[in-house]
Amino acid sequence: MSENALYKEIGLVNTKSMFKAAMAGKFAVPAYNFNNMEQLQAIVLGCVASDSPFILQVSSGARKYADQTLLRYMAQGAVEMIKAAGTLTTATPSSCASRASRPASRRS
């Protein structure tokens, strides 16, 4: 079994700050369930293209099927894709009001 990784170590943010910014900016944050690399890539690229914050989810069935290490690195890879696109910042009320970028997140 692999050791647990803290979401901040992977480059993700907690949904509490994301939801606070969404409430202040009056926008919704979609949550996407993914089961494979292609789905994850489509989610990341779509949200980067639309400058949208988002939540990554993995079903309990997928968590049982996939190794925890693999899921951790898939999430970390998603963060790296966002960074490569030059759009990873922390969501704040001011950045949500402007066209600032918003991060991926994990479900709390």
Image (cartoon, helix red, strand yellow):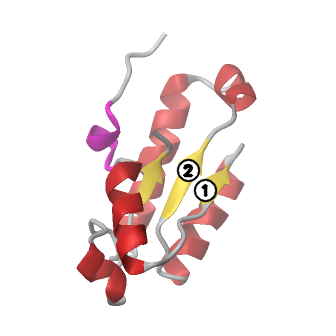
Camera-side residue of 2 and 97: 97
**Cα distance, mark 2 to mark 1?**
6 Å
Whether residue 12 is visible, yes or no, is no
Q: Residue furthest bottom?
A: 98
Return the residue at label 1.
31
Q: Can you say whether 48 is above or below 78 in the image?
A: below
Pointer 2 and pointer 1: residues touching (CB < 8 Å)?
yes
Looking at marks 2 and 1 on the same chain, the residue that comes earlier in the sequence is marked by 1
What's under tag 1, amino acid-wise?
A: Ala
What's under tag 2, amino acid-wise?
A: Leu
Camera-side residue of 33 and 93: 93
Considering the numbered disc 2 on the image, is that residue within a helix, a strand or a loop?
Answer: strand
Q: Can you say whether 79 is above or below 47 in the image?
A: above
Q: Can you say whether 84 is above or below 37 in the image?
A: below
Whether residue 67 is visible, yes or no, is yes
Seen at 53% across and 65% down, the residue is 29
Estimate the x, y position of residue 25 in percent, counting from the top left: 39, 79
Considering the numbered disc 1 on the image, is that residue within a helix, a strand or a loop?
Answer: strand
Seen at 31% across and 49% down, the residue is 11
**11 lies left or right of 74:** left
Return the residue at label 2.
56
Q: Quadrant of residue 93?
A: bottom left
Identify the magenta region.
Answer: 6-13
Which numbered circle lies on residue 51? none
